[in-house]
Image (cartoon, rainbow, N blue to C red):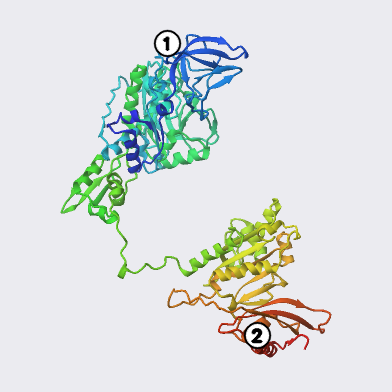
Amino acid sequence: MKFTVSWLKDHIETHATLEVITAALTKIGLEVERVEDRAAALKDFVIASILEAKPHPNADRLQVCLVDAGGDAPVQVVCGAPNARAGMKSVFAPPGALIPSKNTVLGKGVIRGVESLGMLCSGAELELDSESDGILDLPESAPVGTVYAVWAGLSDPVIEINLLPNRPDAMGVHGIARDLAAAGLGRFKDRPVTSIEGAFPCPIVARLDLAEGDAHLAPAFALRLVKDVRNGPSPDWMQKRLKAIGLRPINALVDITNYLAFDRARPLHVFDAGKVRGAIYVRRAKSGEELLALDGKTYLLDESNVVIADDAGVESLAGVMGGTASGCDEATTSVLIESALWDPVNIARSGRRLGLNSDARYRFERGVDPAFCLPGLDLATALVLEFCGGTASQTSIAGKIPHPATRIVFPWSEVKRLTGLELDVSEMAGILESLGFEIAGSPGNSDRVVVKAPSWRPDIEGKADLVEEIVRIAGLDRVAPRAFPRENAQVATAVLTPAQRRVRTAKRSLAASGLVEAVTWSFISRQRAELFGGGAQALALANPIAPELSDMRPSLLPGLIAAAQRSADRGHGGAALFEVGQVFLGDEPGGQKIAAAAIRTAPAGSLARHWSLAPGGVDAFDAKADVLALVAALGEPTSGLQIVRGGPPWFHPGRSAKLQFGAKNVIGAFGEIHPARLEALGAQGPLVGFELILDDIPAPKSRPTKTKSKLELSDFMPLERDFAFVADRSVEAGDIVKAVMSADRALISEAGVFDVYEGKGVPEGKKSIAVSVILQPREKTLTDSEIEAVAARIIAEVAKKTGAALRGL
């Protein structure tokens, strides 16, 4: 919604500055989006006279002009406009001026060897016209040296507000002024509309040709004929206001309707009475009817559209746009002015189906003041008589003007209860009355009153709406800040649940590992669900939105694999994706779980294109690193996590492992995706990944205090010893590491496998597993005998628990 400051002051008597007005508008809920101050933008542009215009010595289409801009001496300007001539007055921009259309600062220049100390401007360069053939040609009376914006009346700022759909009254400048007056910015000029007495009956009858069940589509339809009019340009003041808000003046009759739509939020339409055949009536469109609208486009109508028609056919799409067949032009001598009420829902549907937007639709679909239907017709008639002359008929009306009477029993204490704002009853009553509400006392209760909402406020339905009106005018800044009560001055408990914190921690950890978050569908096809352990009938959708989205997903991996392949198909290889979301393992309670999954098709970071790696150089250990980093970030010690060979069937059987805390608590798996599954999904490998069920990870043990444990740093150097054990091929390397650690938990700080070997020198059916062990003394430096004793205990413990023997013995 746009309007100028002078337009606003037609409806409110105020001395408030532009800054005060814009601040007040935002404060009362009519948020100001932009202010266009053309006088400020054009402050450097002055009226100048061309004293002399000679051909440019080095260019056929340029002229060298001597310009009087009101300074001490004439200025030389090189100009390429075809209409530049001696004796002409135009607009001059000196060096340093900002040219609005180009957003560039003008400087001194030399054009084809001739110095130019400014420029003569066109309307397009000043953003006054969309296009122009030459520089502005001003009348002889224009005073040289005067700021052009001041002389041309462009010193009227334009305000644009962000209008919410529940404020149809603020779609007119009159309603905006009422709100500002209620906020204390001045006196509201609520001038009553003078009724226009008709000189003769309207010869064209208004009719409603609607079925009984369609009466709501057009509650009232009124017409008035004005004959012997002289349709020409509208007054200059009206044209300037319409141009300022982005509307193109057409002629007086059309401009009046456009003006009243913005001035009083009352859309109207005018028909050339000489082009109307027979009566004017409202009906549903017939399927296949067409309308050549005023925007020059032809629209195909159906029975859902309400139209205004005559005996020849459709003349207008009701409440949206008129047709060219009965449009007014300079030859119009008799005009029909139409003012009507339409169903907002039907208007919105018609405009949306046809893709047709207009100022009338914008207002009717949000609701207009029904009580102003006939006064709006009188106001338009008065303007037509003033601008175009003529004689007006009596009003022909079909239907009945509704009189909404929303009454609300309102306790004044409701304002404090809902907002905490304490106001005097007199102030609250004054705010409501200044907004047009009527207040009557409630018998037997001094705190309660009965409030009647005005006809222009269809959004008022209950007590909370009245509280909103009072508070927005009084000011939210008057609500005193208060601290939340704290029991026993204790710190408030955590807002997030442990599960919510775990999800957020998982996302941050995976992103820190170089993975990119993806969000995939919670539904997949039955075939893909079966590939990843799903496909049960209980998890099939009764009404899927598409065949490929028929089942709830049992795993996050199918969606991630499909996303990685789509990226690869578009030339973006090296995918590294993760997702944290829900998976569905059954329809019983607990069958829905939160999982975290990730896949890689290339190493992370700069290694993705490293010369030393073949394309797709990833393996199960990349996935293992990702999942162990995630478990550690979730607060679980990895020492208690067991990695067991094998995994679900969608992982490669020899290149995958399960993650578990004990045999009965398997929390996930990692490894290389099975080639057969990739082929079934239409994806290329190798591809590695993991999936972890976050809900199945044991919660970290609670501690009696959040104080960090004491930092213990040894003063003694650690010692490293390597052991190579020969064990049966079936023995897991992890079992040997656990046996090593159990030999002396106080002295052994770390143990890990660094080599596994089968072949020459190792018996058939056996393998060699080399383990590096770090000993960390804490009390004294170990002697050789103490080191040997620890080594002996390690060898004995490994032999006892795994049957492995030290290699070479």
Query: Quick one: 721 or 612, which is closer to the camera?
Result: 721
How many marks on residues? 2
Q: Is residue 476 above or below residue 143?
A: below
For the question of whether residue 183 can be seen, the reply is yes
Q: Decide: marks 1, 2 in contact (CB < 8 A)? A: no
Binning the other alpha carbons within 10 Å of mark 2 as few (below 14), some (14 to 19) or many (20 upward) gives some
Q: Which residue is mark 1?
A: 140
Residue 327 is situated, as x and y percent measured from the top left of the image, at 46, 23
- Which of the pair 500/767 is nearer the observer? 767
Residue closer to the observer: 795 or 530: 795
Residue 789, numbered circle:
none
**Residue at the (53%, 10%) spot, across then down:** 53
Tell me residue 371's x, y (percent).
31, 36
The mark closer to the camera, 1 or 2, is 2
- Residue 595 in the image, given as x and y percentages of width and height: 57, 67
Secondary structure under tag 1 reads loop
What SS does tag 2 mark? Answer: helix
x, y percent for residue 177: 31, 35
Type of amino acid at the residue the image marks with label 1 = Glu
Residue 545 lies in quadrant: bottom right
The part of the image, by quadrant, that contains residue 803 is: bottom right
The earlier-in-sequence mark between 1 and 2 is 1
Position of 343 compared to 378: left or right?
right
- Label 2: which residue? 739
State left or right for residue 222 relative to residue 604.
left
* In this picture, residue 364 sits left or right of residue 417: right
Residue 279 appears in the rendering: no
- The relative height of residue 251 versus residue 513 in the rendered view (above or below) is above
